[in-house]
Image (spheres, rainbow, N blue to C red):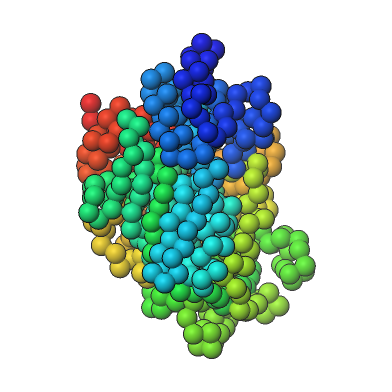
Amino acid sequence: MTAQASAELYSLLHQQFKGDLLRPDDAGYEASRGIWNGMFDRRPALISRCADLSDVQNAIRAAVETGTLTALRCGGHSLAGFSTCEGGMVIDLSQMRQVAVDAEARRARFAGGCLLGSIDTATQKAGLVFPSGVVSHTGASGLVLGGGTGWLTRRFGLSCDSVEGFTLVTADGSFIRANARENADLFWALRGGGGNFGVVTEFEVRLHPLASVLLAEGLCAGPDIRRLLEFWRGFMADAPIDLKWNIDLRLAAHIEKVPPVLRGRPVAGSSLVWTGDPEAGRRYLERALFLCNKDSVRISALPFLELQTMADSDFPHGRRYYTKSGYFSYLDDATIDQMVEAASTIPSSQTQIELAYLGGAAGQVDAKETAFGDRSAPFIMNLLANWPEPSKDEAHISWVRGLFNKLRPAMKPGVYVNFMSGDEQDRVPEAYRERWERMVAVKSHYDPKNFFRLNQNVLPRN
Ligand SMILES: Cc1cc2nc3c(=O)[nH]c(=O)nc-3n(C[C@H](O)[C@H](O)[C@H](O)COP(=O)(O)OP(=O)(O)OC[C@H]3O[C@@H](n4cnc5c(N)ncnc54)[C@H](O)[C@@H]3O)c2cc1C
């Protein structure tokens, strides 16, 4: 972006803008330009930190008029780095974090800049939950618009399944509503279609009663890793929707709660969350963890807010991250062997092979009801590399790519857009598959010039 274009953008905005406009020389710019993934060290020409819906409208109109490349930012957790840009403008919603809960109706409205933690804190005051993700500093907008999976997905569905309406500003600067009655096609597309259609300024959602859960954790090493994965794939097929069981293959941390005999070794870490009757759950969880090292097993009742923040420090801002993800209909023996073998070559202590089993309430929603990708493939795999040193980029990225390529033939086509890296635009149609043509039609209608293009992009028809 030229200095002249940037000055023009600023002059179009600054008189009526109520939030902050940050240019590279302004105090606060450096602190505001970074996003969660340290791989993306970019310098936008302007950060427009909007105070309300009219600021969002003005920012979009000015960007369209000046032809400015624009990124959208809620929590800044885009793994692919889409919430920043070099030159261009960032529409930053971090000042728009209002949450209003109607306890009696079990409904909430929250603004487009909310982090998951702001929503959890507000809804828990009424003993209610909005099903979302597992790290409280993640932005709700990016997560919900891509679909949204977390501890409660099997019990209450994906995050987008609990959305009843969106308010958004489209590429022509107008604000509209999308729900079952108004702009129904857009309502369909926003539940899984990401940031392709406009800036969502408010979500209206259903809430569910829940205040605490049972959490069980345990570690397996050596030949028990393979045995655990074989047991898990069978166990989950009949598990009740009250159970969510995630497994991570990684190097065991050198920390007190890990038995000394396991520290530094490749392990399978199990985390199970039970949302049903605690007494029945405890027996069930003990049975599930029978293969784990006895000293590593812990089962405890946990307030919901503690569950939602327990992983926060494992994924700090500013480290370097790279991911590739996919689905399996079934984890066959050869796939399990490849994963176990790969666990012994993991390049750093925070890097992991994450495995989750979908199904439950999320699997019961008809695939045609929302744009979200495949609900039928129960096994979701996410290869997530996490390291601090730029000099180790190549080692981590090539480990992820190499393992992904090895496992790919056994995968089912499909990918969850929120677990994609920025170099995977060719996989976007794969994320939507039979829903692709409808996605293109909705995009062509609401954003015909592809103003919203820093995302898992759906190209409009010419
Ligand atoms: C530490 C961590 C934990 C995660 N855990 C989970 C998890 O448990 N479950 C899960 O499903 N995903 C999870 N994810 C993935 C997460 O869903 C995506 O990274 C998501 O994009 C993050 O949303 P954000 O608002 O923070 O992102 P941002 O980087 O702010 O935005 C990402 C994209 O979302 C779109 N967007 C953002 N705000 C708006 C808006 N108001 N209107 C329209 N479009 C918008 C834009 O296209 C933008 O480029 C996690 C990611 C991280 C980094």
Q: Is residue 286 visible?
A: yes
Q: Nearer the viewer, residue 410 or 434?
A: 434
Q: In which quarter of the image is residue 452?
A: top left
Q: Residue furthest top?
A: 4
Can residue 404 be seen here? The reply is no
Q: Is residue 16 left or right of residue 190?
A: right
Closer to the camera, 81 or 141? Answer: 141
Residue at horizontal 39 percent and vertical 60 percent from the top: 205
Residue 392: x, y in percent? Answer: 66, 38
Find residue 298 and report its image quarter: bottom right
Q: Nearer the viewer, residue 424 or 342?
A: 424
Residue 106 in the figure: left or right of residue 461: right
Q: Is residue 119 above or below residue 453?
A: below
Q: What residue appears at the point 55 percent right and 43 percent down from the top-left corner?
A: 95
Quadrant position of the C terminus in the picture:
top left
| Nearest the eye: 299 or 229 | 299
Q: Residue 178: image x %, image y %?
A: 29, 48
Residue 296 coordinates in the image, percent (x, y): 68, 74
> Residue, x 54% and y 81% (percent of image)?
285
Query: Residue visible at 68% across and 62% down?
Result: 252
